[in-house]
Image (cartoon, grey):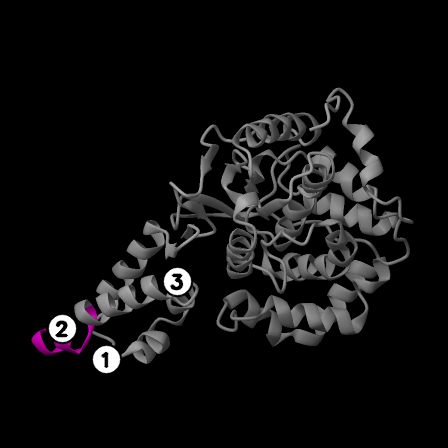
Amino acid sequence: MPNYLYSDFEDCLFLFPKTKKVRNVYWLLYEPDNLLHCIAKSQVRKHRNKAVIKFNENFYENLDYLYWLLRERRYTPGPLRERRIFEPKERLLKIPPYFPDRIVDHCVVSVADKILSPSLIKHTYSCIKGRGIHRCLDDIVAAIQRDPAGTRYALIMDIHKYYDNIDHEVLKRKYRKRIGDEDLLEIMDRIVDCNGNKIALPIGRFTSQMFANFYMADYEHYALELLHVHYLFVYMDNILILGDDKQRLHEVFTRSAMFLATHDHLEINPSWQVFPISSRDIDHVGFRISPFDVRLRKGILYRFFEKMQRTKEKYNLQCEDDIKHAYPSEYGWLIHCSKQHKEFLINKILNQYGKKDHQTA
């Protein structure tokens, strides 16, 4: 591996094409068709939400207000409401008001994401249409099966409190390399700074997903094009790298940690690991992956069984189709496991929560 200097990461900019900055696109935010489309998207599965109902009671007046709010560049982010959740782990959500903030978020993403997303590599998966957990799993399994010799070892690492450590100035500098529309930049800056701090993106704003994905783009290109990593899979702040040499993966980790610390002001969690995949499963995106098997992560499996325990009186599970209709989300995880593991779990579910259990209850 070439011995690149780490004192000046600006040298890495030659990796990224110096395309012309995108300008004169702010008007697309308040273009009527886009406004209506973004309002519809913001209300998906929220038809019973009180704020949504209130908005729709005066739909045309609110639509007109939103149009002029954006057209006259008067939007200012509202206060964030805090909510703490505990699944799968404790997180503090900071949720903006529905009107106008969440609708404005969709408007900004509808325009800015088309400019920023081409910077991402094809093996970035989180919060991207057409990709996701199952696409990531399929690509990892395909890489292992296609190139067993080149994927003998795995490097797994994740960023320490990723959303809480995203530096606003670094993020603004990144998207200014691709966007030259001052009006669009101004509204993006206001959204980034809405928490009143110089670091952290609020988990709960729709725009935070787009910004968090884009923030990792420089590292992704650095790993592929300067470190010459062949198999890189990034799911938000979770990074999996496969390779044929354990020592080389250790060197990749060292250089990655230095790049992320210096260039992005991020720190890798100390739980990172390099190991041979023949002796230990790859624990990534909710699955345990080996060259011979794909199984559900224990935590996800336990939550599935707990849910069935709570709801076993509601359903009469007699066959696989009953599981599919009663628990469609969980069944979606099952069908991506290997055939042997899927059949084992389905038989276990039917034996424990099936028709016999309901007859004796």
Q: Amino acid at mark 3?
A: Ser
Q: Position of residue 156 (x, y in %)?
A: 50, 38
Is 224 left or right of 51, judged from the image as shown?
right
Query: Label 2's element?
Result: helix
Q: Amino acid at mark 2?
A: Asp
Cα distance between the residues tagged 3 and 1: 22 Å
Residue 332: name its quadrant: bottom left
Give me the residue at 39% from left, 62% from top. 338
Residue 29: name its quadrant: bottom right
Q: Is residue 9 above or below residue 186?
A: above
Residue placed under numbered mark 3 in the picture: 338
Q: Amino acid at mark 1?
A: Gln
Give me the residue at 30% from left, 79% from top. 322
Residue placed under numbered mark 1 in the picture: 318
Is 280 left or right of 146, judged from the image as shown?
left
Majority secondary structure of the magenta segment?
Answer: helix
Query: Of the numbered discs in the image, which one, if any, rests on residue 357?
Result: 2
Give me the residue at 74% from left, 64% from top. 66
Magenta residues (range): 353-361
Q: Is residue 224 above or below residue 102?
A: above
- The answer to whether marks 3 and 1 mark residues whose Cβ atoms lie closer than 8 Å is no
Mark 2 residue crowding within 10 angstroms, few (<14) / some (14–19) / many (20+)? some
Q: Which of pointers 3 and 1 indicates the residue nearer the eye?
A: 3
Q: Nearer the viewer, residue 245 or 38?
A: 245
